[in-house]
């Protein structure tokens, strides 16, 4: 059996970063990618922009057309891996191939959750929204069935971006969120209310503290969403956006340790030598946390993939830990949230500034004179400085009064940290 | 690579760098025309920060380990293979602001018209960045550094 020196499962951000990480260390050993989807590497977060018509087919690709060739990557598309055998160093594909490897990177991503216990959740017109094919299927369904009304289940990031696209397609939309506010994982009440106002102004009905209990159908077609509170919402399309589960089935019953995701150390290596994991499938060390966490966001996926790739090629690169952060534009309102934004620790100090008219909202969470979280709505231009302060654990006692001021900037930072930033050498991420 | 070095003790806060950056990145390349007709559609890639007697002009540091490239979801943010400068391909940017979120010096701004990311490109069309050429007190210097 031919052995593949570097085998990568997956073809999105973490996998591509894996290739780029390997190539920083090793110029020529061949790399093989096994991709479940049939496409050249494309940007998953762009699917909402594609659905709304903002981005066309040609602009969907994450890397140029000659990326694989330039990086000496043999890419095998439409090839789903169903199991990994770490002892014999092989993987098994859905169509029966066994492929041997020396070093393996599992960057298989996640699978959107569809609750099986909701009657009607298998009807025509029920979708999830994480792949280009999902977006394509939704667009085709909307056109062919003349869909007028849609219900999105879940007011998180994926839910809101799908809503935006559906509004753009001219649909009457409702979002149903289980928590007491949208974007509850990263937003506090105030930020969520500002975002909700923008959605409502765009014509979206927002229902919190509620969820879909049943999908009523007629001839297998979606007719109504029936909520827990008994309310009936007429719709022909339902999008489930209630979360993503890491794709760990392929390592089930192997010596590769898993929890919610595949457990990795600070070198992105799994519990088995020469087997690495990165991206949405991995449960990795995290900043502001003692436990390893799955933080399925793009910057973490890239960093993890790149570190994994470098280490697979023999480097000794450390992954410093992921940080929960999100930048999302909600119907024209830019927002950024980083770190611990709704602290349950009473020792934390919270600074806020709200201008409902603008609208603009800033919130800084401090713990022991260090920034541990921040929310920016409207005026986001300086947000990155706070991300840096969180990552580098900088003591901000000397500039605390300035944090929320209009002219807060790099100049306001402690001199030593400022000099480090401005020196222009590599900034550690 | 060649980088812009900042000598904050030489900066007099005149903001000529901001003006020349704007003009260089305007369509007309003419100062009055750029100011009258294009001011709304260009964001300078350099910003002067001031506090008391201290001031300095800050633009993208073109980090060796650039977090904005890693965080870019479209692939619009890339490193130019020749100059090693970090460049934003505005045709591919969709304005998600991931780069704004991760830039530790806040050198990436929203613009023009808040649609796409805007930043220093080290004046690709000029031999020496115009902020450096036009700094009257050598507070900005363009020089090679020994990275790696």
Image (spheres, coloured by chain):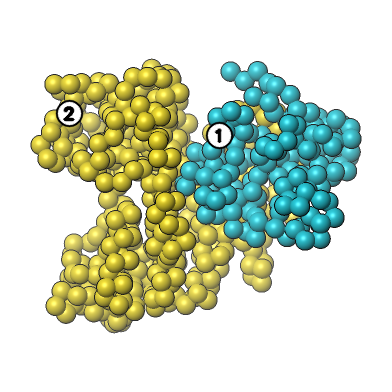
Chain colours: A yellow, B cyan
Is residue A401 something that shows in the picture? no
Name above or below for residue A90 compared with residue A96. above
* Image point (36%, 33%), residue name: A68
Relative to the observer, which residue lies in front, B124 or A15? B124
| Element assignment for label 1 | strand
Pick the quarter of the image with the C terminus of chain A: top right
Residue B87 locus on image (x, y percent): 59, 39
The numbered disc on residue A99 is 2
Q: Secondary structure at mark 2?
A: strand
Q: Which residue is mark 1?
A: B79
Q: Position of residue A428 (x, y in %)?
A: 56, 30
Q: CA distance from mark 2 to mark 1?
A: 34 Å
Q: Chain of mark 1?
A: B
Residue displayed at 34% across by 79% down: A148
For disc 1, the neighbor class at 10 Å (few under 14, some 14 to 19, many from 20) is some
Q: Are marks 2 and 1 on the same chain?
A: no
Question: Is residue A100 placed above or below A106 in the rendered structure?
Answer: above
Could you say where residue A296 lies in the image, as x and y percent from the top left? 39, 46
């Amino acid at each position: 059996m031919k052995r593949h020196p570097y085998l990568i499962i997956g073809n999105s951000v973490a996998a591509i970063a894996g290739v780029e990480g390997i190539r920083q260390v090793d110029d020529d050993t061949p790399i093989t990618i096994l991709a479940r989807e049939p496409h050249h590497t494309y940007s998953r977060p762009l699917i909402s922009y594609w659905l709304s018509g903002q981005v066309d087919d040609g602009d969907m690709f994450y890397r140029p057309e000659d990326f694989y060739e330039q990086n000496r990557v043999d890419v095998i598309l439409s090839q789903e891996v169903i199991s990994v055998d770490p002892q014999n160093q092989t993987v098994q594909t859905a169509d029966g191939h066994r492929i041997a490897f020396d070093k393996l990177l599992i960057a298989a991503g996640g699978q959107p959750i569809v609750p099986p216990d909701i009657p009607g959740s298998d009807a025509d017109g029920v979708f999830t929204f994480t792949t280009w094919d999902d977006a394509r299927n939704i667009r085709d369904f909307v056109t062919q069935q003349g869909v007028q009304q849609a219900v999105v289940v879940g007011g998180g990031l994926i839910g809101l971006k799908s809503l935006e696209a559906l509004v753009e397609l001219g649909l009457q939309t409702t979002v149903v969120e289980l928590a007491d506010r949208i974007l509850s994982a990263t937003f506090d009440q105030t930020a969520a209310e500002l975002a909700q106002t923008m959605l409502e102004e765009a014509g979206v009905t927002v229902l919190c503290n509620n969820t879909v209990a049943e999908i009523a159908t007629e001839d297998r077609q979606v007719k109504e969403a029936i909520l827990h509170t008994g309310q009936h919402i007429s719709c022909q399309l339902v999008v489930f956006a209630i979360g993503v589960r890491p794709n760990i089935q392929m390592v089930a019953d192997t010596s590769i340790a898993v929890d919610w995701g595949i457990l990795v150390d600070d070198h992105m290596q799994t519990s088995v030598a020469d087997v690495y994991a990165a991206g949405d499938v991995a449960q990795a060390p995290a900043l502001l946390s003692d436990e390893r966490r799955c933080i399925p966001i793009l910057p973490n996926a890239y960093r993890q993939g790149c570190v994994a790739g470098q280490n697979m090629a023999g480097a000794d690169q450390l992954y410093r830990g992921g940080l929960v952060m999100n930048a999302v534009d909600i119907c024209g309102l830019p927002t950024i949230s980083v770190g611990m934004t709704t602290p349950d620790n009473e020792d934390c100090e919270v600074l806020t500034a709200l201008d409902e008219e603008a609208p603009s909202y800033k919130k800084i969470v401090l713990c022991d004179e260090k920034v541990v979280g921040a929310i920016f709505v409207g005026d986001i231009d300086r947000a990155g400085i706070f991300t840096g302060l969180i990552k580098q654990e900088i003591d901000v006692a000397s500039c605390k009064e300035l944090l929320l001021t209009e002219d807060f900037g790099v100049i306001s930072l402690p001199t030593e940290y400022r000099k480090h930033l401005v020196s222009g050498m590599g900034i550690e991420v | 690579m060649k980088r812009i070095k900042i000598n904050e003790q030489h900066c007099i806060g005149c903001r000529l760098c901001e003006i020349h950056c704007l003009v260089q990145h305007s369509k007309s390349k003419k100062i009055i025309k750029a100011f009258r007709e294009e001011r709304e559609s260009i964001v300078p890639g350099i910003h002067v920060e001031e506090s008391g007697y201290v001031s300095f002009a800050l633009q993208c540091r073109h980090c060796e380990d650039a977090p904005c490239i890693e965080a870019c979801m479209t692939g619009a943010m890339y490193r130019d293979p020749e100059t090693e400068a970090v460049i934003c391909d505005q045709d591919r940017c969709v304005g998600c602001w991931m780069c704004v979120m991760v830039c530790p010096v806040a050198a990436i701004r929203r613009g023009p018209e808040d649609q796409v990311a805007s930043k220093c490109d080290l004046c690709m069309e000029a031999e020496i960045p115009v902020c450096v050429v036009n700094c009257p007190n050598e507070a900005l210097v363009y020089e090679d550094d020994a990275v790696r």
